Each structure stands twice: as structure tokens, then as C-alpha cells.
Amino acid sequence: GQNIDQPTEMTATEGAIVQINCTYQTSGFNGLFWYQQHAGEAPTFLSYNVLDGLEEKGRFSSFLSRSKGYSYLLLKELQMKDSASYLCAVRERTGGFKTIFGAGTRLFVKA
Amino acid sequence: DGGITQSPKYLFRKEGQNVTLSCEQNLNHDAMYWYRQDPGQGLRLIYYSQIVNDFQKGDIAEGYSVSREKKESFPLTVTSAQKNPTAFYLCASSSQGAGGNTIYFGEGSWLTVV
């Protein structure tokens, strides 16, 4: 089975940088995703990591260490619209593939 | 436009009733998923299907049933055995294979027991 842990809530200031951590335990690891979800809406894809290292995409970056079962999402130049939940998800190969989500981290961006 | 269509957007169920949520995708994806989300919580996997006529239970399958008779369609039935069905239900799909494939979501269906 899988176990995915991320902080429940975080607060940061507009214009700042915030790092959201995710740790996981799984067998058959086949990739880690980060999604953004605004209240009442479907999640939207932010990033994907399958190899160790940092993936950068504009204001968002995601890091993966497979040996440590650890990932983080880095958000730079925070904007008020970045207030949302951020979901860490792990894809597992178990014959086929399935993706399990963590409980999500609610980020509050204040002025 | 390609995408995932869920219907209805809002559904009210009386206690003891079965209801079916529709999910259709035209992305030619092999894999489809159903997740449940309770207020302020993460997504929990109900069922998933990797190919037509095959599906597997997720973490919270009790009280739910699915079918996968066509590649494009993966309906979810919430049965009367599900004692607390009020939640936000999300259907998703992805292509298969080892090459890291993103899950795409429908807009979700809100189910309320009245």
C-alpha cells in the first residue's frame, strides 16, 4: 500500500517563496505528481517527477528524491490567486498503474 | 474539444436509493478512475480501470460499483449500501504505459443525500 504525508495548512505572504513538502512510502514507484485545487473545483496538473532532481516550470518547481521518498513543490513570487490546496500524488505500478493522492496542503497567501 | 465529461454536476439522492454518475472521455485514454473527496480532505480512490471490461477496487470501494463496457465510459453507481455518500466525486483518466502520464480530471459531481 501507499502512505503519503504532507502538511495540512501553510500560510505565506504575497511575493514570498513557499515550499510544500511531501513524503511517501510505496512499492513500485512510477512517478510523483503535484496538483493545484481551488475550492469546489477539479484538480489541475502542475508538475511531474519520475527521476531525481528539480523540475522548473515558471514560478513553480518540483523536486524529487526517490531514495528518501521525498518531494517538494516550490512556489515563487506568491500571488493571492495561489491560495489553494496542493495535492501530492504518487503513481504506483501494481500490475497496471494507479495513482494515490495525499490529503493535500491548504495554502493561504496573505497580503 | 477533448476532455472528460461528468454528469450530472449536482445530484440529490434519497436514502435507500441507488444513483449513477456518468463519466465519458474522448481522450482515447486506457485508464479511468473514480475518486471521492470530502470537504477539506484529499482524494480517495474508489475504483479504477486499466482496460475495457476490467476494473479494480481502490481504497474505499465498499458501497460503490462500476462498469467498463466501453473505453470511453466509466459510470459509477453509488448504492444504498454506501451509508455516507454525500461528497464531491471526481472522474479522471490517463493513458497507460511506463512513461509518466498525467491524470486529467472531469469537473466533478456533487452528490447530496436528502
Image (cartoon, coloured by chain):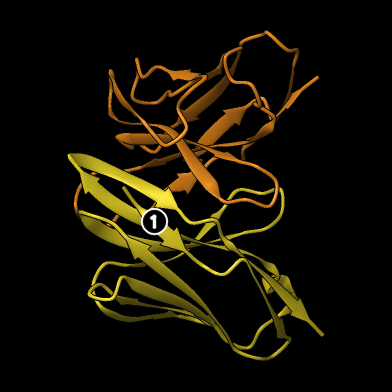
Chain colours: A yellow, B orange
Name the chain letter of the residue that bears numbered label 1. Answer: A
Which image quadrant is residue A71 in?
Answer: bottom left
Q: Give the class, few, some or many, for how many residues have Cα within 10 Å of label 1's Cα (few <14, many ≥20).
A: few
Determine whether, in the image, residue A28 is placed left or right of residue B39: left
Q: Please tell me whether residue A2 is drawn above or below residue B107 in the rendered image.
A: below
Residue B99 point in image, percent of width and height:
21, 56
Residue drawn 58% across the image and 30% down it: B6
For residue A7, side relative to residue B87 (left or right): left
| Image point (43%, 23%), residue name | B73
Q: Quadrant of residue A75?
A: bottom right
- Give the side of residue A27 with respect to residue B47, left or right: left
Numbered marks: total: 1
Residue A49, x across and y down, in percent: 32, 69
> Label 1 belongs to which residue?
A3
Q: Residue at x 59, y 20 (%)?
A: B82
State which quarter of the image contains the C terminus of chain B.
Answer: top right
Q: Which percent across, then down, holds residue B109? A: 65, 32
Q: Nearer the viewer, residue A73 or A21?
A: A21
Give whichever of A24, B98 is nearer the camera. A24
Q: Quadrant of residue B26?
A: top left
Residue B85 place in picture, x, y as percent: 65, 26
Which of the pair B43/B6 is nearer the observer?
A: B43
Q: Would you place residue B11 above or below residue B100 in this image?
A: above
Q: Is A3 situated above or below A16? A: above
Residue that protrudes farthest toward the bottom in the picture: A16
At mark 1, the secondary structure is strand
State whether residue B8 is above or below residue A106: above
Please state which amino acid type lies under the numbered disc 1.
Answer: Asn
